[in-house]
Image (cartoon, grey):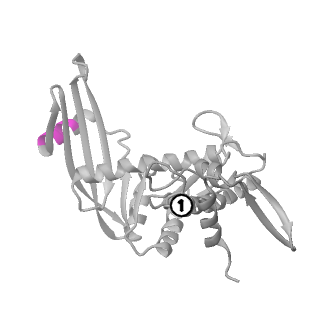
Amino acid sequence: MSRTYHNYDGYAPIAAYIGQEGWCLEVELRPGSQHSQNGAVEFLQRVIVAGKTLTKEKILVRADSAHDALETLIALENAAVCYIIKWNPRKNKVTEWRDRVFAQGKVVTPRPGKRIGTLIVIESKEVDNVTYQLKRIVRVTERTIDRHGQLLVAPDITLEGWWTNLSLAPETVIELYCQHATSEQFHSEFKTDLDLERLPSGKFATNSLIMALGAFAYNILRYIGQQGLLGSEAPLRHPAKRRRIKTVLQELMYLAARLIVKSRRLTLRFSRHCPAFDAFSSVYRKLLPAT
């Protein structure tokens, strides 16, 4: 445990998920003072290898601006995967980019007093005698009138960008990156549903083991939820592609039943009106080893 950038003692874990269901490929506990980019390339290389063993589909890697580094982009280029990495403008001058994007890019005016410009920029980078062509989508939003109709004394300018190797329209790439926010929901399930927001030990190695076991339990509960709470036997709920870990715990793990020993066999007896019995038995039959 060490001081984080939020100025309190804690950890800075990094996690990777795959699929719309949010299967956890790996979660690594790191000291709070460790920068996000430190060790991130090695982490990405491991999870990409793991992802390729699970699917033959093309893998899209999405990461936020904390991983905007040349070494990350080169590693992803060499890994032969698709990627979208949020650009960190850092010390770039916003007004210079505004003038360039509005002069060379595609500009739309969704409402009076608001302009949005998009520009694709190709940059050549040479690393270890190999030249890489890196593509960056830059978007500038300028507001001279706010959404309530109030004139602004000075324009409000927002500069954003995304590194990518996708040959899609900029709007599509940006929308794909915005779906990256779903991973925050997976983080939330780790912290709240599995009660891992506060780790139990003062020793780093012990807490690292707890996080690894948490990822194991997370994936098991995710599987149980996908098998038991999305089919026709599941309790009535709104349609969804996945169920929260909390929902899985409440509807399939916390069921009331009696444990009966009869003829040297253990039997679970549920209530006659148990609403989740069909879903529970369905998952149980799928997990029961063949005899």
The quadrant in which the C terminus is found is bottom right
- Whether residue 34 is visible here, answered yes or no, is no
Q: Nearer the viewer, residue 236 or 87?
A: 236
From the viewer's perspective, is 54 left or right of 213? left
Residue 79 x %, y %: 41, 70
Q: Looking at the picture, does residue 142 appear above or below residue 71?
A: above
Q: Residue furthest front?
A: 272
Residue bounds of the magenta highlight: 98-103
Query: Residue 153's x, y, as percent?
Result: 24, 16
Residue neighbourhood size for the residue with mark 1, other residues' Cα within 10 Å, grouped as few (<14), some (14–19), many (≥20): some
Please name the residue that numbered disc 1 is placed on: 233
Main SS, magenta residues: helix
Horizontal side of 241 relative to 178 (left or right) equals: right
**Taking 92 as reference, is 67 above or below it?**
below
Provide residue 54's location: percent of width, then percent of height.
49, 73
- Which residue is rendered at x = 33% and y = 70% of the image? 130
- Is residue 209 visible in the rendered image? The answer is yes
From the viewer's perspective, is residue 125 above or below residue 190? below
Depth order, front residue of 226/203: 226
Q: Quadrant of residue 165?
A: bottom left
Q: Is residue 145 magenta?
A: no
- Of all residues shown, which one is farthest toward the bottom? 291
The reply to whether the magenta stretch includes residue 102 is yes
